[in-house]
Amino acid sequence: MAEQRFLSILLAFMVFNIPIFPLTSGYYEVSASPSLPPSEPPVSPPYGILPPSPSPSSTSLPPRPASQPPVPPKAEPPSPCSTTPSLAPSPSPLPSSGIKGAYWPSWQAEIIPPSSIPTSYFTHFFYAFALIDPTSCYLNISSFDEKWMTNFTTTLHQKSPSVKVLLSIGGAAANATIFSYMASNFDNRASFIISSLNEARRHGFDGLDLDWEYPATQQDMSNLALLFREWRVAARLESLLSGKPRLLISAAVYFSSNVFNSGVYRTYPGYAIREYLDFLNPMCYDYRGFWNTSVTGAQALLYDNSSNISTSYGISSWKASGVPSEKLVLGLPAYGRSWTLKDGNQNGIGAPAVGVGPGDQGMIGYNEIAEFNLKNNATVVYDGETVSTYSYAGTTWIGYDDATSIINKIKFAKSQGLGGYFFWALGSDVNWSLSRAASMAWDGEI
Ligand SMILES: *[C@@H]1O[C@H](CO)[C@@H](O)[C@H](O)[C@H]1NC(C)=O
Ligand SMILES: *[C@@H]1O[C@H](CO)[C@@H](O)[C@H](O)[C@H]1NC(C)=O
Ligand SMILES: *[C@@H]1O[C@H](CO)[C@@H](O)[C@H](O)[C@H]1NC(C)=O
Ligand SMILES: *[C@@H]1O[C@H](CO)[C@@H](O)[C@H](O)[C@H]1NC(C)=O
Ligand SMILES: *[C@@H]1O[C@H](CO)[C@@H](O)[C@H](O)[C@H]1NC(C)=O
Ligand SMILES: *[C@@H]1O[C@H](CO)[C@@H](O)[C@H](O)[C@H]1NC(C)=O
Ligand SMILES: *[C@@H]1O[C@H](CO)[C@@H](O)[C@H](O)[C@H]1NC(C)=O
Ligand SMILES: *[C@@H]1O[C@H](CO)[C@@H](O)[C@H](O)[C@H]1NC(C)=O
């Protein structure tokens, strides 16, 4: 039984007597975040601003390969090294240069093979996604994943030995109920933790990234805190036993530390994130979209002086929750969202609209936007007030990020002392222009 293995690992850990449980008092406090009334009216169903964001079913994103038949449980305890466990310290998780991250949608493997990815613009890559088995809580590694995970880690490490490659679990299309079940008790968490550490090692990853979209209740949030603590302890232990650098642990989260306008009000466990995660990826996009077609919107705007649904608010809420700035990695979209204007002559942000425009429910990759703009001689406007870009042609309107808005967001991230940035997703850039601009801006070259 996985949980017995987990317990024996914990026992072994206690035998080594290594003080890695920072059992400071106040662990269960979730507060420290600004207590926000759900001041914004709940956005209409089904999604609020919690849409299936990086939708794996976008037209630009070929559908995920169908799930594979059941996999036998593979979770094994991290095999103790034949040598004495090394007490070498964990590697410094945050390179001084910061994190330049990007998610790789594995279902686009044929379109954007690992060999085509320029490692010079990035420090961290995320394989998207592994799913959790609803019964065993082990990772479901399909034969497709079996083929591509090792290829992904090996290829990227060969191209640049210093890049970190993480296995991301979940994603917008994953069933949040399964996460909730997995996190709900010790045995389920233990199964998940051991399976994830085991699969990460088996496929050459440097870390694990949890992409639970989203914890739905405060109970889920409390369980998430427990998961982070146990995951971190187990990762440390695995490192001691294997003599390998500790696996990194990160999470992709809501843009804001408090979910204030969708479902019940709830707050992420800032304390547990600060203590147990190496870094955090707030998904600073999907603020506007197909769930409200009455007006156009900037889906990832930095500033909004009439609403808290903005990146600047989200980042400030994360800081207020107790997560140190340097652990915050700013999410950037390499895609936009489109609308059909009511009147082509009224074409600003917030202009009347009657429906979505091109894309999968209006979600459209930057590469397709560039193509649309060129083909239709679209007017492109950079809006400095919101730090966003939009284009329009006829009655089609698209809000997105181009190099200018990306560069200005990176400058914001630097001015806020953040730990880096990440893109959703590799494969939607145009000639790596956004990736290059972001990297140069981060390095202060532009
Ligand atoms: C995991 O695999 C099992 C068996 O193959 C399957 O029933 C289940 O739907 C899968 N879970 C997910 C989340 O894909
Ligand atoms: C990865 O897969 C590609 C395409 O199947 C193959 O050409 C390449 O040799 C593989 N690389 C590694 C390191 O396995
Ligand atoms: C999500 O998972 C739960 C539990 O396994 C299941 O009851 C539910 O039908 C699933 N929902 C969807 C949309 O697949
Ligand atoms: C859509 O968004 C606009 C601007 O935020 C808002 O005024 C309007 O009430 C929203 N409509 C719906 C149906 O939520
Ligand atoms: C937001 O601020 C700008 C100036 O920075 C101002 O022009 C605009 O009217 C303001 N919008 C609202 C809704 O207050
Ligand atoms: C935004 O959040 C702050 C608290 O952080 C609150 O005082 C303010 O009223 C909120 N603004 C809106 C427009 O909801
Ligand atoms: C493209 O649009 C601009 C105005 O936005 C116009 O001056 C130009 O003639 C147009 N070019 C073509 C090829 O339609
Ligand atoms: C991308 O690069 C190709 C080849 O260098 C070039 O033909 C194309 O015009 C570029 N596309 C854009 C949008 O810059």
Image (tube, rainbow, N blue to C red):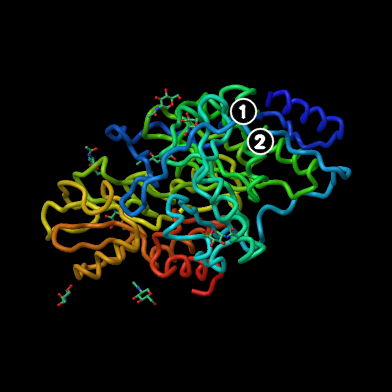
Q: Position of residue 245 (x, y in %)?
A: 74, 50
Instruction: Say which element carries label 1.
Output: helix
- Upstream in the sequence, badge 1 or badge 2? 1
Name the spot of residue 98 as percent of width and height, x first.
Answer: 60, 60
Contact (Cβ within 8 Å) of mark 1 with mark 2 = yes
What kind of residue is marked 1? Arg
Q: How many C-alpha atoms fall within 10 Å of the one at disc 2: few (<14), some, or many (≥20)?
A: many
Cβ at disc 1 under 8 Å from ligand 3: no
In the rendered image, which quarter is residue 11 located in?
top right
Quadrant position of residue 36? top left
Q: Is residue 350 left or right of residue 152?
A: left
Name the one closer to the observer, 245 or 404.
245
Image coordinates for residue 125, horizontal then vertical, percent: 55, 55
Q: Which mark is residue 189?
A: 1
Q: In 3D space, how far apart are the residues under numbered discs 1 and 2 (Cα atoms)?
A: 8 Å
- The disc at residue 231 is 2
The residue under the point 44% across, 32% down is 175
Q: Is residue 312 left or right of residue 307?
A: right
> Looking at the rendering, in which quadrant would you find the N terminus?
top right
Image position of 347 (left or right of 241): left
Quarter containing ligand 5? Answer: bottom left
Q: Is residue 352 left or right of residue 252?
A: left
Q: Quadrant of residue 259?
A: top left
Residue 85 vertical position relative to residue 5 in the rendered view, above or below:
below
How many residues crowd mark 1 within 10 Å: few (<14), some (14–19), many (20+)? many
